[in-house]
Image (cartoon, helix red, strand yellow):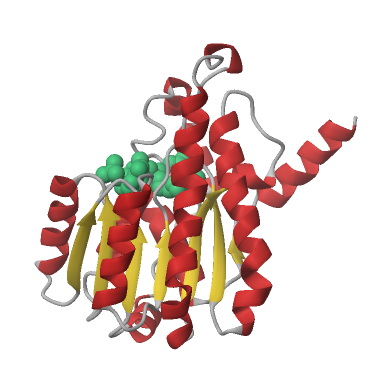
Amino acid sequence: MKNVLETILFPKTRLHERQVEQRIHNKTIVITGASSGIGKEIALKFANITCQLVLVARNRERLDDVKRLIERKQKAKVSVYSLDLRDEAERICFLQAIHEENESIDLFVSNAGLSIRRSIYQSLDRLHDVQRTININYEAPVAIVMSLLPLLEKNGGQIVNVSTINCQLPPMAHFSAYQASKSAFDTWLRSVTPEIRKRGVNVTSIYLPLVRTQMIAPTKQYNRMPAMSPEQAAIKVINATMKQKARFEPWWLKFAKLYSSRKVSM
Ligand SMILES: NC(=O)c1ccc[n+]([C@@H]2O[C@H](COP(=O)([O-])OP(=O)(O)OC[C@H]3O[C@@H](n4cnc5c(N)ncnc54)[C@H](OP(=O)(O)O)[C@@H]3O)[C@@H](O)[C@H]2O)c1
């Protein structure tokens, strides 16, 4: 039953390889959260293209593995930056290095993220849960966008936000810190979009459903629920990016929104 639902809810899409090759050739792409899950799959999809990939996450070993896999194809060149994006000092050093080593950036994929599932009543002494989700899901991408904007403006660059369908639906219990922080960046980015578009920078917001990555592994209920594969999620992100779409969301989200708005108003 789960497999049937997955086929219906997440119809398989193929990567538009020729379009990707044309758009990405010789471009510089920064991807945060590239050591695992969706970010890693996005990076791997660019392996066959002559381009410069800048991959960011904390786990150096995993980043080096991704770099090795990509460079085996002898096309894309990879630089890895291992840092905790929540740490302001580390972030400043990283952004300084990006400015020193690149005259322009063509694509920034804001993907690094942290999800926490916890009841408010198990969180009363855990304000740090709110702080760490806000730091990685909101403050860090805002700081990166602010710093990279001048580099993105040089060649009409693009910002891609790997967001969640939860930003489009009424909030779910137990995910308050995650949802509030993801919604904060989603709102911030959409709010600055009209200004930065005027300077030639495009913005794409990707509203993903459940994706089977290590992020959802601790929530056992999710094992039984239909979920997208990380590779399919990466393909959706890349195809929407190549088409410079303002947004991607699963086909059924509009019905979920309608249903939930009726439920809320009842
Ligand atoms: N999985 C889902 O169901 C789902 C659904 C909708 C949206 N999303 C979004 O998709 C994005 C990717 O998540 P995923 O599912 O692929 O999860 P994942 O496999 O856990 O990947 C998260 C990535 O973020 C990096 N990261 C986390 N904290 C970091 C920090 N403090 N500093 C630097 N890097 C950090 C992780 O690397 P290190 O641990 O090496 O630092 C990892 O590469 C997230 O923004 C998430 O909100 C996921």
Query: Where is ligand 1, by quadrant?
Result: top left
Q: Quadrant of the C terminus?
A: top right
Residue 199 in sight in this render: yes
Residue at x 25% of width, y 68% of height = 97
The one of 218 and 96 positioned closer to us in this rendering: 96
Number of marks in picture: 0
Q: Quadrant of residue 107?
A: bottom left
Among the 4 quarters of the image, the one containing residue 218 = top left
Residue in the image at 41% along x and 79% along y:
151
Q: Please, is residue 34 above or below residue 17 in the view?
A: above
Against 255, residue 76 (above or below) is below
Task: State the image coordinates of residue 182 (x, y, percent, origin top left).
Answer: 56, 45
- Furthest residue toward right: 266
* Front-most of residues 2 and 99: 99
Q: Is residue 7 visible?
A: no
Q: Quadrant of residue 109?
A: bottom left
Q: x, y percentage for residue 224? A: 46, 26
Residue drawn at the location 32% of the way across and 84% of the way down: 103
- Determine whether, in the image, residue 52 is placed left or right of residue 148: left
In percent of width and height, residue 221 lies at 47, 22
Q: Nearer the viewer, residue 233 or 76?
A: 76
Q: Closest to the observer: 234 or 11? A: 234
Left or right relative to 119: residue 103: left
Task: Give the left or right position of residue 57, taking residue 209 as reference.
Answer: left
